[in-house]
Image: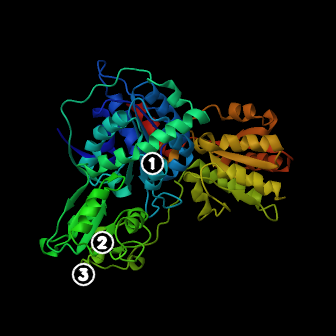
Amino acid sequence: MKHLLLGDEAIAQGALDAGLSGVYAYPGTPSTEITEYIQHQQSRRQPDEPVVFCRWATNEKTAMEAALGMSYMGRRALVCMKHVGMNVCADAFMNSAITGVNGGLIVVAADDPSMHSSQNEQDSRFYGRFAMIPIFEPSSQQEAYDMMAVAFNMSERLHTPVLMRVTTRMAHSRAVVLTTDTPQQQNPMSLPENVKHFILLPAYAKRNYAELVDAQPVFLSESNCSPYNSYTLGANPKKAIVACGIAWNYLHENLTPDMGFSLLKVSQYPLPEQLIHQMVNDGAEEVLVMEEGQPVVEELMRGLVPSSIAVRGRLTGELPRMGELSPDSVRLALGLEPTKTLTLDTQEVLAPRPPALCMGCGHRDMYAALNEVAREYPSPRIFGDIGCYTLGALSPFHALHATVEMGASVTMAKGAADAGQFPSIAVIGDSTFTHSGITGLLDCVNSKANIVVLISDNLTTGMTGGQDSAGTGRLEQICIGVGVEPEHVRVVVPLPKNMEEIKSVLREEIEYCGVSVVIARRECIQTLKRHLKAAKK
């Protein structure tokens, strides 16, 4: 059957057709649509069709651990996250390479070069190399679909987790994908043959690690023979190109038969050394490496080919050091003239439209009250976090003094208070609070930090489209359970009519010498519209 699918959707459908039993994820662009697609398919499931677990996890670490637990029981599991989520799940991810797997386990990391919706550029292939496990990097939506079955089979055959790395354009562009008419059935439950493999006491872990090291030649052999890696001898073999993942598409948009380059396509790692040696033996004198993200392959190539061969790419300036690749940047790297396009000075004809909080959003009223109160103090510091409310750093509010990563608002505010800052205020969303703010709040309670934690609770994970939030309806109980004094867990409704009450609560809690939590709760305006629309049907 043919379908028009996003790269994310192709991954999801490929996993379903490969006998997936569970997907575990925390929403984050550009990975969110993988889980949403599986959730949508499950909502249409017929009674006789298998159930696939597809609820959102609290964070990427819990997702990775739950998926490992499903794998332990012999079933196939998928973990999905954006690149910075790999940092959150790194402990479990790295150790899963040491435990190995029982049922197939695939970790999908969706990188965001150019930082369209992220706070850094990060290449998840480093994590795959760090863990010493196989990596797949599809060059097309069809490959993304096909690779899922191959990767699950490999995971079970070699008893290893597998990393699939995609980037924004692969995740969020569409293409026709041919899917199978005979999906694979889910694995039955089966316990691992060697339970000690999953017990990482040093004595067992050392043996497991030795097995992982011994498996490296096997992983390399798989890569050398992979249908997703290929080498083509060119008419002018002195010049060769190595193109990885989506860069293979960009290359072929500009390639002409008369160029004569030898071509090495890489979509499975470790790097296919046998194909690289063949390229060298064919007389390559100059190699141009095209890869999305950081110069992972370019750096590795320098150790795999003789020093007399010039390796070029992002490090040498043929391709931009930062941001996404594009057909145009690849075209310039090939020595071609830029594509002629219509040039337009947008500043002359379009008014700038920086991102802003939605009109009617509760975060707006929260910031309006917070700014008024903060101005009453000579040097307030407000530490922000990752979510829609991060836009409070921009006009018209300019309310935030720092935003670093998920959960950092609470612990940065604590550190600032420890240094003597007053007032020290953290602003965090409900979903981010349960993701990674709770442990920071426990630190605050244990040290009796003099801070105010302002949880802007819009009852959803708003920034990524309105997914479920793990703490909905339980934030007060969570904060009290962590140890915040009940009388200093306050709830307000951020509406203009409540402005004086909100400011009064903020003043009282700022003046309290200890840990305070103020929950500003009002449903996201976007999810509210959807809920009202659904109620009318």
Q: Point out the tag, 1 or 3, that comes first from the N-terminus.
A: 1
Q: Which residue is mark 1?
A: 132
Against 249, residue 458 (above or below) is: above
Tell me whether the residue at label 3 lies in contact with that at label 2, contact meaning CB atoms closer than 8 angstroms: no
In the picture provided, is 449 more to the left or to the right than 262? right
* Spatial separation of the CA atoms under disc 1 and disc 3: 40 Å
Q: Position of residue 507 (x, y in %)?
A: 81, 50
Which sits in the foreground, 182 or 26? Answer: 182
Q: Which residue is mark 3?
A: 337
Per the image, label 3 sits on a secondary structure element best described as: loop
The C terminus sits in image quarter: top left
* Spatial separation of the CA atoms under disc 2 and disc 1: 25 Å
The N terminus sits in image quarter: top left
Q: Point out the tag, 3 or 2, that comes first from the N-terminus.
A: 2
Q: Position of residue 420 (x, y in %)?
A: 84, 58
Look at discs 3 and 2 and give the one toward the viewer: 2
Q: Which residue is mark 2?
A: 287
Look at discs 1 and 3 and give the one toward the viewer: 1
Q: Point out the tag, 2 or 1, that comes first from the N-terminus.
A: 1
How many numbered discs? 3
